Image (tube, rainbow, N blue to C red):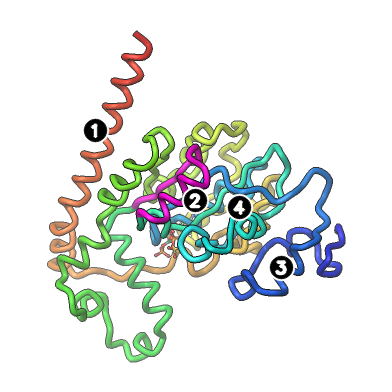
Amino acid sequence: SPTTSCGTRNVLEEVRPSSSNIGTKEDSRCESAPVFAAGQSRRLPKALIIGFNKCGSSALRSFLNIHPDVVAPTLEIRFFIDHYSKGLEWYRRQMPPSTSRQITIEKTPGYIKTVESLKRIYEFDPDVKLLVIVRNPVSRLQSQYAHHMANHPETRAANEFPFAAWMYNRTVKIHEVVEFWSDYASYIQQAYKIFPMNQFLIISEEDLEKDPLAVVKEAEVFLGLRRVVTGDVFVFNETKGFYCFNKTHPFFSSALEDGELDASTGCMIQTKGRPHPIIEERLLQKIIDFSRPKVEELFEYIVIVVVVVVVVVVVVVV
Ligand SMILES: Nc1ncnc2c1ncn2[C@@H]1O[C@H](COP(=O)(O)OS(=O)(=O)O)[C@@H](OP(=O)(O)O)[C@H]1O
């Protein structure tokens, strides 16, 4: 392994900042004089996964990262939200090394949430490609609940906090909770006001879950990558209940750099793909009813955008 200023750790260990060392003295010392493999350096992202959390954003990053022409830091760097004042050089230093043939993709689902971070991204690179992943609001709420319970084991042990209690035990009304977690449309509209529509790829978690190959192939075209990912890269894991990487595939070695991947199974780590709670019928119907207008708004908006793009293409061609 190449030697770095941090000692004898290899290049990949050296470039994976942990949440505890981002921006710390040790981190900058390690990055001040790295020795990379021939032709490698840290490069700023050409594409960003800007939304949405609990929608499969990590699996999307990890599945794109298997492409030989893609590198991606595992951590959410949150540069355009929390670290902007540290400057672009700091941001660049958080990236893994890449060759000139590779593109860097960074994932921070919170970027889509504020106009300020979107404007900063535009200033950073008006041509940057933007990936957005959305999900059925019911599953997104179940995922958020599972996340909450995993982070509050004391309530889980007491078994006193079922999904319904989590939904109702708040200062805001349940319809507001549902609307908040189903509102993809207004954030996407907000982003469309800053970037041209052709810079977005909107993906659904359901598609990623059912057919990761189709999503990765779509992304290859969108990102201008070589079309090299084939069906044998992914394999459905019955125990996990999700598609995972085929550990015998030659591309798997690049997936191993991903800190959210379980190398022994080829699947995403345990915190990705937790069991979801069963929702009692009446509450489920309420969630569906409250979320439907938001989802319809999203679909109407996406359809309008598709029609506009088709009309523009036809006009240009004619
Ligand atoms: N292949 C594969 N493997 C594992 N998990 C998968 C996969 N595809 C999609 N998902 C779904 O990703 C959900 C987690 O979403 P995020 O990564 O966006 O969550 S986070 O916001 O970063 O915490 C996660 O939600 P939970 O099931 O609630 O854990 C998964 O349902």
- The residue to which callout 2 is attached is 60
Magenta stretch: give its range.
Answer: 115-134
Element at label 4? loop
Q: Residue at x 21, y 63 (%)?
A: 178
Q: Could you tell me which quadrant the C terminus lies in?
A: top left
Q: Is residue 87 above or below residue 191?
A: below
Q: Does 275 appear above or below 195? A: below
Q: For residue 315, which quarter of the picture?
A: top left
**Residue 162, placed above or below residue 180:** below
Q: Position of residue 235 (x, y in %)?
A: 55, 49
At mark 2, the secondary structure is helix
As rendered, which of 316 and 156 lies closer to the eye? Answer: 316
User: Which quadrant of the render holds ligand 1?
Assistant: bottom left
Residue 38 left/right relative to 42: right
Depth check: give the residue in front, 18 or 211: 18
Q: What amino acid is found at the position of numbered circle 1 in the picture?
A: Ile
Q: Secondary structure at mark 3?
A: helix
- What mark, if any, has residue 72 been given in the picture? 4
Q: Is residue 132 magenta?
A: yes
**Percent position of residue 220, x then y:** 54, 35
Image disc number at residue 28: 3
Asked if the residue at label 2 sits under 8 Å from ligand 1, the reply is: yes
Residue 102, percent from left and from top: 67, 41
C-alpha distance separating marks 1 and 3: 47 Å
Q: Single out the residue that lies furthest toward the top.
A: 318
Q: Is residue 138 magenta?
A: no
Mark 4 neighbour density, 10 Å: few (under 14) some (14–19) many (20 or more) = many
Give the mark, 4 or 3, whose residue is nearer the N terminus: 3
Tell me, for residue 304, which label it has, or none.
1
Q: Amino acid at mark 3?
A: Ser
Query: Depth-wise, is mark 1 or mark 3 nearer the camera?
Result: 3
